[in-house]
Image (cartoon, grey):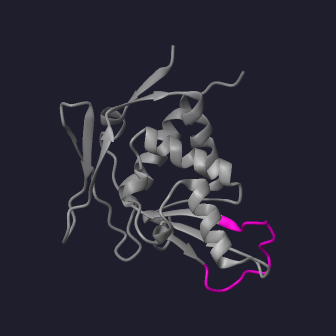
Amino acid sequence: MPMKIDILKLLNDVETYPTWYSNKTYRFIVTDNKDGTITVMYPCTGRQPKQTFNRYIELTPQLIWTLGFIEGEGLKSRGKSAYRRFIVTNNDSEKMAFVLDVLETYNFVKRSNLTKNSIRIRYGNEHNREKLLKYWSKKLNVKRNIIYISQTPDPIKKSEFGTCDIYLSNIILRRVIDEIKSYVFRSMKPI
């Protein structure tokens, strides 16, 4: 029987990572919407960032694989302004599409809500920018206008279609995914 995680309970007493400019943290305010979803927000000066998630998530092989992939290919740093970024990097379009599929299935990310520069492609000298845009848009099933193709070639990048970053500036998503990964990895027992 698959394990279910109660995100509402998981986020109890969780704070944002410290900001780079003031080292301040903000406690998450988590509201049960009574429709199977929760809203996560934190109080700060100016706008009130918030995001809706499923209250319960079922731990499936697909989600476990994705969490492991994010752990291996994602941003670990919390220094400077990295605390607010959710980034996954790889040059395998099938794996990156799978990550987006799972994140969308579990209501973490919606492709239709991705903004300009959410997908970033770094390429080597031999790559055609238009070809890269067409390739990644099709493989990831995203609109072309959210893909940023680096302006300067990176001669170190040798893969045929460059390297892709899923790059989201989202403090809440970064922290929620990190909390889920931490919980799942703590719950696992060696064979």
Of residues 162 and 131, the one drawn nearer to the viewer in this rendering:
131
Residue 116 forms part of the magenta stretch: no
Q: Give the left or right position of residue 25, taking residue 83 as reference.
A: left
Q: Is residue 190 above or below residue 66?
A: above
Q: How many marks?
A: 0
Q: Position of residue 41 (x, y in %)?
A: 25, 53
The quarter of the picture where residue 98 lies is top right
Q: Position of residue 36 (x, y in %)?
A: 26, 30
Of residues 10 and 124, the one drawn nearer to the viewer in this rendering:
124
Residue 72 seen from this side: no
Residue 133 seen from this side: yes
The quarter of the picture where residue 87 lies is bottom right
Q: Residue at x 48, y 66 (%)?
A: 118
Q: Residue at x 47, y 68 (%)?
A: 146
Residue 151 forms part of the magenta stretch: yes
Q: Give the left or right position of residue 175, taking residue 75 as reference.
A: left
| Helix, strand or loop: magenta stretch | loop
Of residues 57 and 124, the one drawn nearer to the viewer in this rendering:
124
Q: Residue at x 59, y 64 (%)?
A: 165
Q: Is residue 40 above or below residue 147?
A: above
Range of magenta residues: 150-163
Q: Give the left or right position of residue 55, taking residue 182 as reference.
A: left
Q: Residue at x 26, y 60 (%)?
A: 49
Which residue is situated farthest in the top direction here?
A: 1
Q: Position of residue 97 (x, y in %)?
A: 59, 50
**Quadrant showing the C terminus:** top right
Q: Give the left or right position of residue 70, taking residue 124 as reference.
A: left
Which residue is situated farthest in the bottom direction here?
A: 152
Q: Position of residue 140 (x, y in %)?
A: 57, 55
